[in-house]
Image (cartoon, rainbow, N blue to C red):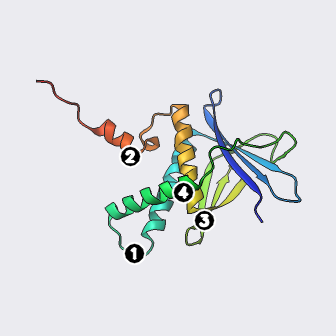
Amino acid sequence: MMGLFQIKFEFNTVEDRLLLRIFEKESNRPCVEYRLWLTRRFVNLFISGLDRLIEEDLAGDMQISPDAIDAMKKFQHEAAISKADFSTSYAAAENCDVFTDRPLLVVMLKIKKKTKGNYILSLLNHENIGIHLTAGMDLIYTLKKMLLDSVGSAAWNQPLFQTNEEKAKTTEPPGYIS
C-alpha cells in the first residue's frame, strides 16, 4: 500500500540546476527522501521524453488526427492537474532517511511501458544509480507541469520550456504601424 508520496522541484541559483526531492513514507517504515540534481540539458531531455510518452500513449494503435490528439492532451492535462494537490507543503522531515548523502546528478532517463497508461521512469546517474518511478498518466502530466513551472522560476528561456501559447506569441510577426 502506498503511503505519503510528495515531489518538489527547487531551483538552486548557485548550481544553476533543479533539485528534485521525492519524499516517501509507507506505513510501518521510516520515511525516505530522494534528492536528484537535474541540469538544464537533462530537464530538456526529460520534458521531451514526457511529451513523446504522452503522444505515444494517446496515439496508441489508433489513427487520430493531430488536432484530436492536441484536444485530448489538453483535456487529460486539465483532468490530471485538477486531481493534484499543490496546496500541501512538502513534508520531508529532518529525521527522514536520505537515499544518499549528496544529491545524485541525473544524466539518463529511461522510460519503460508497464501497462497501458502506466510507465516506469528511471532517473539515473552515470553509474546507473537512481530512482525508478512508477507513473500513471496523471503523474506524468503533473510532473511536466511542475517541471515547466520550475523552469519558469529558473528563467531558463529556451523554446522547449515554453507552453504552446508562449511559443505562438514569440513566433507571431510584429505588428505594423502605418
Pinpoint residue 131: horizontal percent, then vertical percent.
71, 55
Q: Are marks 3 and 2 in contact (CB under 8 Å)?
A: no
- Which residue in the protein does label 2 denote? 164
- Which residue in the protein does label 1 denote? 62
Pinpoint residue 28: horizontal percent, then vertical percent.
89, 59
Residues packed near mark 2 inside 10 Å, few (<14), some (14 to 19) or many (20 plus): few
- Which residue in the protein does label 4 denote? 80
Residue at the spot 38% in from the left edge and 40% down from the top edge: 166
Task: Name the image quarter holding residue 10.
Answer: top right
Indicate which label's residue lies in the foreground, 4 or 2: 4
- Which residue in the protein does label 3 denote? 119
In terms of depth relative to the viewer, which is nearer, 124 or 153? 153
Query: Cα distance, mark 1 to mark 4?
Result: 22 Å
Mark 1 and mark 2 lie on one chain; the one further toward the N terminus is 1
Amino acid under label 4?
A: Ala
Pinpoint residue 38: horizontal percent, then vertical percent.
62, 42
Q: Is residue 54 left or right of residue 20?
A: left
**Taking 158 as reference, is 81 above or below it?**
below
Query: Cα distance, mark 1 to mark 2?
Result: 24 Å
Q: Secondary structure at mark 2?
A: helix
Mark 4 and mark 2 lie on one chain; the one further toward the N terminus is 4
Amino acid under label 1?
A: Met
Query: Cα distance, mark 3 to mark 4?
Result: 16 Å
Amino acid under label 2?
A: Asn
**Taking 21 as reference, is 154 above or below it?**
above
Mark 3 and mark 2 lie on one chain; the one further toward the N terminus is 3
Q: Is residue 136 left or right of residue 90?
A: left
